[in-house]
Amino acid sequence: MHVTWLVSDTNAFERNPGPTSKLDCIVPSLTYKEWFELFFVVLGVRSEDTASLENCGRDARIVEFDEEIAGYPMLSRICGVYWDAAFEPDEVQNLEDECERVLENASNALASKGVEKLLAACKEAKRLGLGIFMMCD
């Protein structure tokens, strides 16, 4: 799915993927199944591929969505398998807040595991004063 980096400069990283400071590092990332369960099951996102989801269930291969999820603008950036998502250092707290709200209400084990990875990335990014760049494979 994505490779999640904590980076000092998200713009420089986007232009030339790789460390932008000595603190930059890779952290555990969402798997496709965690992403799918979080967005399409827990948050109820719909996409152009919704027909596949309804016809094939969780075996459908959905790669993106294009709607902003009400109340979750930060999480909405993680909109697809082939799309990067960047969060500046001053946005990390907002992402963390959204993840905590989801975790409070989610009973889905895979989605919760993915959200816990995002929360861990947020906490480490805040500790180091870095942003988060989720780079698609």
Image: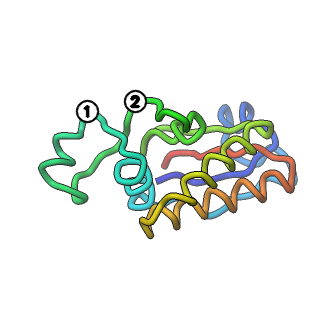
Q: Is residue 92 shown left or right of residue 66?
A: right
State the image coordinates of residue 40 (x, y, percent, origin top left): 35, 48
Q: What is the quadrant of residue 28 in the picture?
A: bottom right
Please state which of residues 115 and 125 is positioned toward the viewer in this rendering: 115
Crowding near the residue tagged with mark 1, few <14, some 14–19, many ≥20 C-alpha atoms within 10 Å: few
Mark 2 lies on residue? 66
Which callout, 1 or 2, points at the residue further toward the start of the chain? 1
Q: What is the quadrant of residue 64 in the picture?
A: top left
Q: How many marks?
A: 2
Rendered residue at 30%/35% (across/down):
47
Q: Residue furthest left?
A: 55
Relative vertical location of residue 92 with respect to residue 109 in this rendering, above or below = above
Q: Amino acid at mark 1?
A: Glu
Q: What is the quadrant of residue 67 in the picture?
A: top left
Q: Is residue 56 shown left or right of residue 135?
A: left
Rendered residue at 57%/45% (across/down):
135
State the image coordinates of residue 77 (x, y, percent, origin top left): 54, 36
Relative vertical location of residue 46 with respect to residue 127 in this rendering, above or below = above
Task: Say if mark 1 contacts mark 2, CB within 8 Å.
Answer: yes
Colour logic: rainbow
What is the CA distance from the residue labelled 1 to the residue labelled 2? 9 Å
Rendered residue at 36%/41% (across/down):
45
State the image coordinates of residue 111 (x, y, percent, origin top left): 46, 61
State the image coordinates of residue 88 (x, y, percent, origin top left): 74, 36
Q: Amino acid at mark 2?
A: Asp
Crowding near the residue tagged with mark 2, few <14, some 14–19, many ≥20 C-alpha atoms within 10 Å: few
Rendered residue at 56%/59% (across/down):
103
Mark 1 lies on residue? 48
